[in-house]
Amino acid sequence: MNVYKFDEPGLAAWINKLLETVPVYCPAAKGEKCGTHPGWKKMTEVMLPGTGGPAGSSVKTFYFPQPEVLSTCSLKKNDDDGLLLKEPAPAAEKQVVFGVRPCDGRSVELNNLPYAEEKLFQQNRERTVLVGFSCSEPASTCFCQATGGSPYGTEGLDILISRQDDDFLVEILTDRGAEMAGEGLTPAPAAEITALEKLRAEATGSNENCDRLKNKDMAALYDAAFWNPLSESCLNCGVCTFLCPTCYCFDIQDEALHGKTRRIRYWDSCMFPLYTLHTTGHNPRGRKVQRVRNRFMHKLKNFPDRFGPLSCVGCGRCVVECPVNIDIREVVTDLLAVE
Amino acid sequence: MATINEKISEEIRAQARKLLEAKEVEAFLGYCQGSLPMTARPFVARTPEDTDKLVWNSFCVLNLANYLPALLKSLEPPRGPRDPAPEGPLPRAAILATGCWSRNIVIQIQENQVDRDRVVICGIASRGMVAQAKVKELFAGREILKVVEEDHKLLVSGKGFSEEINRWSVIRNNCLTCIHPDPVMFDVRIGEEGGQRKSDNRFADVEEIENKSAAQRRQWFEEEFASCIRCYACRNACPLCYCPTCFVDDAKPQWVGKSVDQVDTSIFHILRAYHCAGRCTDCGSCESVCPMGINMRILTKKLTSDVLNLYGSEAGLALDSPLPLTTFKQEDPQDFIITEQPADKGGE
Amino acid sequence: MEPKKNWEPKIIAFLCTWCSYAGADLAGVSRFQYPPNIRIVKVPCSGRISPNLILNALNNGADGVLVSGCHPGDCHYISGNYFARRRFALFDNLLEFIGIEPGRVNFSWISASEGEQFAEVVKEVTAKVKKLGPATRLVKKINEAA
């Protein structure tokens, strides 16, 4: 689609115009106070992201907001709609998420594989416009190329902004993006577009890890000796899963209070013992090592076997924030070494 | 010249090797090098060869006592829930312990989670641990690629910069106000004795909030905990939290809702802190591991301050002094009991 | 939220079965009048009352909570209320610390022979909670919109 060129004041003016029309979210600093989306704040003034590295929290909070109300019901028999399940009106108002890195954009595309027919996810996808920012200098913990992504990748994004010296190239990638972009913008010169394409082609990662893992025997990976020492330090907290852009597991619960009830969906984590607990009291993944193994096996083996790509975009959040420094990059190496 | 921490690391490795070779312990719980700057990874050495990996530095922020009950259990021969305990002494484990960690081990022993005879405590006087978040804040916008630690400074470098900062300036808040850096109980001492440290006002941050108005305190509380994502890292990093089923996982009754809801999050944090009342040693693990930068430690610190003011005791300082909430005095203050207040009929 | 007209607070009272509940019983038998705002939950001992219960009451829509046990020294289980006293003191302070209005959660000692005092305490607590208005903190709301 179209590529436009902005100088810095021009970009600021364009963003300011956006701020007037739709809610725009941008990454919040650690510890900064946020609203309904932890890690993201309502943008009030123009702030451009740095040269590389992902935001503290992933964009999945916009696709899987929590709590997400699935249905409501009044428990009072005498109410007109008493004891009738009602679905809330679909959320339709547009929202813009600004400063998304290509890894996060790609995560939406990956999550779309299992959620292709899920109504609420698709609704949120329809109303959310992701404005990406390419990483000219990825952080040392980034490894998007090793998972098949690219610091200039466009997957899942609606608009991608790339710095070019003092100017910005703005690529409009989808209809949603075009709608937000507006009209009367300056097209970028063809030479600069070619240069960007070249940069992208050079930076695009490979699927080699993914292909090699797919060719491995599931049972051999499952029985690998490194799981025990790896999991020993794990706290079984939910940091990795809740920060991960491609962890999409949820739990559902009915809440009943004051004569009303609602069915909500919220994030669950395979690190929690409750995740697999049966009503009988039996827990098929009752031990820590089983849970840790499941998390990595799902991302690196089961998901690729079923859907194709790795369920990891290489953002490195879990690597940075894990309280005990469990490093998924080392797990990939260990898995690849299994014969 | 070797730094203090390098010398301590050397001693740890020698000690661990000795204990494991002599088969005195089956596991040695310590730290190994992490994969990123300013990280250390909890690590269990099981063979003399493993011990080469052990290290000690200013980034060992997670309280190792957290792993102790489960580690000891894992060393026992497997048996069913109704099988009798095996005869003879059970395998032992060694653990590194600074002041607060050793106090947590004392508490675990008092609460029957750990058998004193099965632990070899290698005590280290803590020099204070560095808060990764504080260093990152100092270098906001620049990525830190390497941190070299010297005795009193950190050499922080990255792409295009290399700076020296004072180590004490980035010490964790709980270490800044710590007055018990030296282990209270140990079998083997590693490094030099730490001695007592003084702190002018340990509870200044608590008092700052206490001095606010009720409305301000309410606002502070709601804002502070607003970004919680309920990952439970604070709970899981806590050596006091060993319940097989946490109150947040109870379903009948369900004490606290599961989702990210302001009320549910508040109740989680109130009860989590309260369950640590009279037990918390202010080790700072909860604050260090929070991915959202929430200062939940202030709640447990408030409780610690109250326990000290009301009952004059601190948790885990000695095996023979009971935990504050497992004992009582007949003359404990009770001016909060409305029937004990002076009659003030008709008034406010 | 503006309190509705004729709003009456709901107050959950956790009473120990040996003293305070018997005190409430005596108040009834002796025909001492007290406001009908309290809902009594009988517990074996004030030592049984955990903060979970108190917060759960507020969470589920109670406007106030009254916790009452035997006077120190009178506990049927010798020392239950002494342990409870330490716990209540800390919990009371913690609630104040996070800005919960004083008077939402109340603690008292009432013996089996103090029917009149029971009525007085209920009057006092009801008046306090009425003055504070409906509880807004730690009260879960189920809104249709998330």
Image: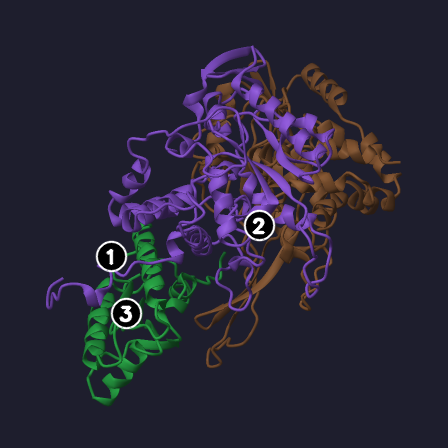
Chain colours: A brown, B purple, C green
Residue at 47% in and 37% down: B293
Specify whether B259 is left or right of B326: right
- Label 2 environment density (alpha carbons within 10 Å; few <14, some 14–19, many ≥20): some
CA–CA distance in space, label 3 to label 1: 14 Å
Q: Secondary structure at mark 3?
A: loop
The picture places residue C77, in percent across and down from the top left corner, at 37, 72
Q: Single out the residue that lies furthest toward the front.
A: B88
CA–CA distance in space, label 2 to label 3: 35 Å
Q: Amino acid at mark 3?
A: Gly
Q: Nearer the viewer, residue B302 or A237?
A: B302
CA–CA distance in space, label 2 to label 1: 34 Å
Residue B333 badge: 1
- Label 1 environment density (alpha carbons within 10 Å; few <14, some 14–19, many ≥20): few
| Residue A127 seen in render | no
Chain for disc number 2: B
Specify whether A287 is left or right of A306: left
Residue indicated by mark 2: B115
Q: As displayed, is residue B240 above or below residue A140? A: below
Answer whether labels 3 and 1 touch (C-beta < 8 Å). no
Chain for disc number 1: B
> Which quadrant: the N terminus of chain C?
bottom left
